[in-house]
């Protein structure tokens, strides 16, 4: 590990934290991001469920969200297994790296530290996906507690409060899902560290650039703004 390695790691963490802060859906910038727009549509969807008794549409949507979350949680488990296998094959990997002319040779300890960091990255993703899956499950229960249309005439306020609870739970589940997915995307930049600190910085910057474009300048965002904003 060199000074350049520590600087690259610091830049990685700084960019990760800054991007998460800017796109978590709570910041009201002049240029609204994709996450915040989707949170508004989540709220619109669940409030709309107050006007129908048949909730099969809502349960199917939540089931789809849970299925996607479970898929990524399973994927991170496989990635974690690969990281532990890589730790057990350090000597063989070092022999391969030594034969490559442009690979930064940081030694065995540096390599193991980098693999350990990658393991932590995937472990963080797994816990985020796992908690997101649980929150989507809670959201489905809260959706089931929303009163029928005929009952809302007696206590409209309680029905609206039940819908707001489901909205908050759904948005929290999406927040943790986005955090896990963001960590997986950033792991692509992290892989550049095995080549060298400068490649690490460049790849991380590229990933952040792509994610920022999708949040603030993508066609998906423009589609959500079709109503005019």
Image (cartoon, rainbow, N blue to C red):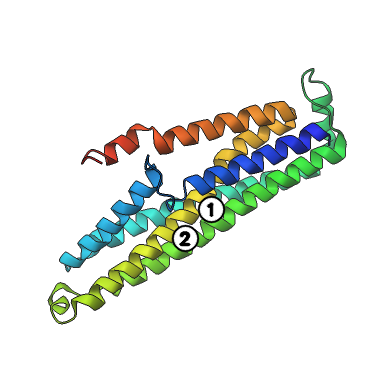
Identify the residue at horizontal 37%, vertical 33% (top origin): 218
Q: Quadrant of residue 4?
A: top right
Q: Residue furthest top?
A: 101
Identify the residue at horizontal 61%, vertical 33% (top origin): 204
Identify whether 135 is placed above or below 176. below
Instruction: Say which label, 2 or 1, has the lower sequence index.
Output: 1
Q: Quadrant of residue 183?
A: top right
Image position, residue 135 (x, y; %) = 45, 64
Secondary structure beneath dot 1 equals helix
Identify whether 112 is placed above or below 56. above
Image position, residue 97 (x, y; %) = 80, 26
Identify the residue at horizontal 31%, vertical 67% (top origin): 164
The residue singled out by tag 2 in the image is 133
Which one is nearer the viewer's eye here, 158 or 73? 158
Secondary structure beneath dot 2 equals helix
Q: Residue furthest front?
A: 30
- The Cα atoms of the two marked residues, 2 and 1, are separated by 9 Å
Q: Are marks 2 and 1 in contact (CB under 8 Å)?
A: yes
The residue singled out by tag 1 in the image is 73
Count the labels in the image.
2
Image position, residue 15 (x, y; %) = 60, 40
- Quick check: can you spot residue 89? no
The quadrant of the rendering that contains the N terminus is top right
Image position, residue 176 (x, y; %) = 49, 56
Identify whether 224 is placed above or below 180. above
Q: Residue furthest bottom?
A: 154
**Mark 1 Cα-neighbour bin, 10 Å: few <14, some 14–19, many ≥20:** many
The quadrant of the rendering that contains the C terminus is top left
Which one is nearer the viewer's eye here, 120 or 89? 120
Q: Quadrant of residue 141?
A: bottom left
């Amino acid at each position: 590990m060199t000074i350049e390695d520590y600087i690259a790691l610091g830049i990685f963490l700084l960019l990760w934290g800054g991007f998460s802060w800017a796109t978590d859906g709570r910041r009201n910038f002049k240029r609204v991001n994709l996450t915040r727009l989707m949170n508004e549509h989540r709220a619109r969807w669940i409030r709309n469920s107050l006007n129908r008794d048949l909730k099969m549409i809502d349960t199917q949507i939540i089931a789809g969200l849970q299925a996607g979350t479970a898929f990524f949680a399973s994927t991170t488990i496989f990635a974690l297994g690969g990281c532990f296998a890589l730790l057990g094959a350090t000597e063989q990997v070092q022999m391969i790296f030594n034969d490559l002319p442009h690979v930064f040779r940081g030694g065995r300890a540096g390599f193991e530290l980098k693999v350990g960091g990658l393991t932590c990255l995937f472990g963080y993703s797994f816990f985020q996906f796992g908690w997101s899956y649980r929150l989507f499950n809670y959201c489905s229960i809260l959706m089931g507690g929303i009163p029928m249309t005929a009952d809302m005439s007696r206590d409209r306020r309680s029905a609206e409060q039940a819908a707001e609870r489901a909205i908050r739970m759904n948005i929290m589940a999406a927040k943790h899902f986005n955090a896990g997915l963001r960590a997986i995307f950033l792991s692509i930049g992290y892989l550049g560290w095995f080549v060298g600190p400068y490649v690490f910085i460049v790849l991380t910057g590229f990933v952040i650039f792509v994610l920022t474009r999708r949040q603030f300048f993508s066609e998906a965002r423009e589609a959500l703004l079709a109503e005019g904003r």
